[in-house]
C-alpha cells in the first residue's frame, strides 16, 4: 500500500452523515425474519423425514430385524466390533501413529447382546422367554456363538427368518429373537432401549446403534441419497436442498486415498483443519500474502473509491 493510500485510509471522514438507529434496525429484522420463518414452517413444514423407529423396522422388515438381533448375540455386528467409545473390540480411527479413538477411551459402555437383546427380554410376557434366556446364560461363550452363527446362516440361506425350520442346533436363539421382534412390533422396544441409560426417554444411543446394525436403515439412507458415495453430507431428505457448504467434506470422500481408507474421517478432518489454518495465516504466508496486489480484484470492486481519490 502506498503512502498516499494509507493517508486516505487514516483521514477523518468528511462526507455526508445521517443518524442510524441500530437497535431499531435489529428489532425490525428480528421481527420480519421470525414472521417469515413461522410462515414458511406453517406452509412447507419440516424438510426432515419422521424419525425411524424400532417398531417401524420390526413391522416393515421383520426378517432383517431378527437377523440383526441374531448378529448381536453372535457378536458379529458393527456395534459389537466398533471399539471406543462403546467397547474395546477394535482400535478404531487412527491418524498415522495417533490412536485417536482408542485414546479417547470407553465413555459409553455398550454390550450389544446384553443391552439390545437380553435386557429388553426381561420385559417380555412370553412364558418361553425366561427358560430360553436361562439356557443362553448358562451356556459357554463358544456355545452361544455357535447357536447364533448357525441361526444367522440359516436365515441367510432361507432369505427370510419366517422360513427357517426349527432345529435344536439354534438353541434358544429363535425363541429370544422372536420375542424381541414382538416387543419391537408393539412399540415397547423403543421405550426400553431409550431408558436403559436414563429413566427419561431422551437418550437414543442404544436404539440408534441397534438400528444402524441392520440393513433396513441403510436401505432407507440409500433411497434418500445419504450414503457417503452419494455425497450424503450435502444432501437433505426429500426434495429440499441440502447443505452446500459441506461440499468440501463430501468431495474428499469421493477421491483416493480417502475413498478406500478405513480412517477417512480422521484424515479428512485433519486435512480440512490444515486448510483452515492456511486461511487463518494467509496474511503471513510468503507470496500468498502478495496475491491481492498482484491480482487487484479489490480495485475493481472499489473502483469508484479509487477513481474519486485518484488512486
Image: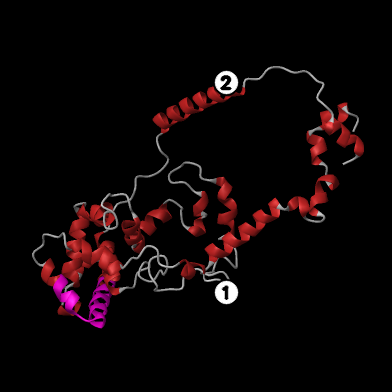
Few, some or many residues within 10 Å of mark 1 (<14, 14–19, 20+): few
**Quarter of the figure with the C terminus:** top right
Picture quadrant of residue 65: bottom left
Q: Earlier in the sequence, mark 1 or mark 2?
A: 2
Q: x%, y% of residue 48?
A: 40, 43
Kindly identify which residue carries mark 2: 24
- Residue at the extreme left: 127
- Answer left or right for 244 relative to 236: right
**Where residue 208 is drawn, which disc sits there?**
none
Q: x%, y% of residue 154?
A: 25, 74
Q: x%, y% of residue 150?
A: 25, 78
User: Going 84% across and 45% down the picture, which residue do you hit?
Assistant: 293
* Residue 150 counted in the magenta span: yes
131 in relation to 139, above or below:
above
| Residues drawn in magenta | 133-157
In the rendered image, is residue 251 in sight? yes
58 in relation to 174, above or below:
above
- Give the secondary structure at mark 2: helix
Between the residue at mark 1 and the residue at mark 2, the CA separation in whole angstroms equals: 55 Å
In the depicted view, which residue is nearer to us: 70 or 23? Answer: 23
User: Going 74% across and 52% down the picture, which residue do you hit?
Assistant: 282
- Answer left or right for 263 relative to 198: right
- Of helix, strand and loop, which mostly describes the magenta segment? helix
Amino acid at each position: 500500500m502506498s503512502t498516499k493510500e494509507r493517508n486516505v485510509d487514516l483521514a477523518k471522514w468528511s462526507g455526508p452523515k445521517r443518524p442510524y438507529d441500530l437497535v431499531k434496525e435489529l428489532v425490525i429484522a428480528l421481527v420480519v425474519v421470525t414472521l417469515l420463518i413461522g410462515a414458511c414452517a406453517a406452509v412447507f413444514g419440516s424438510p426432515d423425514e419422521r424419525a425411524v423407529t424400532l417398531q417401524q423396522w420390526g413391522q416393515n422388515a421383520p426378517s432383517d430385524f431378527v437377523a440383526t438381533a441374531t448378529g448381536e448375540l453372535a457378536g458379529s455386528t458393527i456395534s459389537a466390533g466398533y471399539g471406543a467409545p462403546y467397547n474395546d473390540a477394535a482400535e478404531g480411527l487412527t491418524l498415522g501413529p495417533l490412536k485417536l479413538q482408542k485414546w479417547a477411551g470407553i465413555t459409553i459402555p455398550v454390550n450389544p447382546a446384553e443391552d439390545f437383546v437380553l435386557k429388553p427380554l426381561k420385559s417380555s410376557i412370553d412364558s418361553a422367554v425366561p427358560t430360553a434366556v436361562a439356557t443362553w446364560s448358562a451356556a459357554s461363550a463358544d456355545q452361544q456363538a455357535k447357536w447364533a452363527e448357525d441361526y444367522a446362516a440359516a436365515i441367510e440361506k432361507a432369505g427370510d427368518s419366517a422360513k427357517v425350520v426349527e432345529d435344536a442346533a439354534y438353541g434358544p436363539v429363535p425363541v429370544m429373537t422372536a420375542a424381541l421382534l414382538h416387543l419391537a412390533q408393539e412399540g415397547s422396544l423403543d421405550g426400553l432401549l431409550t431408558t436403559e441409560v436414563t429413566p427419561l426417554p431422551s437418550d437414543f444411543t442404544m436404539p440408534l446403534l441397534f438400528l444402524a446394525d441392520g440393513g433396513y436403515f441403510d436401505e432407507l439412507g440409500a433411497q434418500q441419497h445419504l450414503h457417503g458415495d452419494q455425497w450424503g453430507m450435502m444432501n437433505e431428505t426429500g426434495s429440499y436442498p441440502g447443505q452446500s457448504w459441506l461440499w468440501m467434506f463430501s468431495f474428499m470422500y469421493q477421491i483416493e486415498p480417502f475413498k478406500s481408507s478405513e480412517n477417512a474421517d480422521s484424515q479428512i478432518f485433519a486435512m480440512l483443519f490444515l486448510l483452515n489454518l492456511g486461511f487463518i495465516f494467509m496474511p503471513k504466508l510468503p507470496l500468498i500474502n502478495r496475491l491481492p496486489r498482484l491480482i487487484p480484484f479489490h480495485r475493481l470492486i472499489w473502483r469508484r473509491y479509487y477513481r474519486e481519490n485518484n488512486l
